[in-house]
Amino acid sequence: MDFHDFNSFSEYKISVIIDTPCYYQEIIDHGIRIAKKFNINYKYIECRVEEYSIIKNRIYSRDRLISQIDSTSLERFNQAVDKSIKPEDSNYLIIDTSSKNSYDMNSIEEYLIGD
């Protein structure tokens, strides 16, 4: 992943969203460094779906982008579901995105706006 682009966006105080499971501490560390460099808040929201059938349906029914996986298996899902890395300072939000009604947009907005 090339973080050079994120530096450019941060100069303009534009929000940057990385939409991917986070399995590497380096991604969080680099994001935090960029946020500190530009004196902006670093926010981490993990969108979780813990039901394999929902993930499977989403993967096989979407119009896939080149950067997205094209298949899945229950074994692969089980190996990854609880392996994401989170910021060590516990300043993050985990939301259930299994359906449109499973999360509260107000709590997400409060988290993003808060210091």
Image (cartoon, helix red, strand yellow):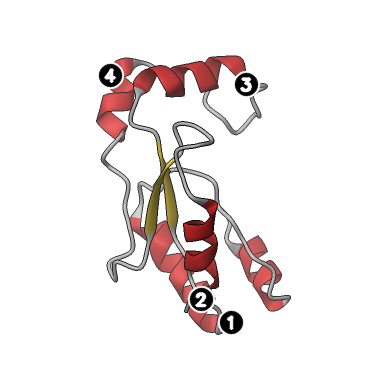
Q: Amino acid at mark 1?
A: Phe
Q: Earlier in the sequence, mark 4 or mark 2?
A: 2
Q: The residue under label 3 is which amino acid type? A: Arg
Give the crowd class for mark 3: few <14, some 14-19, many >=20 residues within 10 Å. few
Mark 1 lies on a secondary structure that is loop
**Dot 4: element:** helix
Q: Residues within 10 Å of mark 4 (few under 14, many from 20)?
A: few
Q: Which residue is mark 1?
A: 38
Residue found farthest to the right: 12
Q: Position of residue 89 (x, y in %)?
A: 29, 71
Q: Quadrant of residue 88?
A: bottom left
Q: Which residue is mark 3?
A: 62
Q: Relative to residue 92, is residue 88 drawn left or right?
A: left
Question: Is residue 73 visible in this depiction of the protein?
Answer: yes
Q: Earlier in the sequence, mark 1 or mark 3?
A: 1
In the rendered image of this protein, does residue 92 appear above or below residue 40?
above
| Position in image of residue 77 (x %, y %) | 33, 25
61 horizontally vs 27: left or right: right
Badge 4 vs badge 1, beta-carbon distance below 8 Å: no
Q: Which residue is mark 4?
A: 75
Give the CA separation, mark 2 to mark 3: 32 Å
What label sits on residue 79 in the rendered view? none
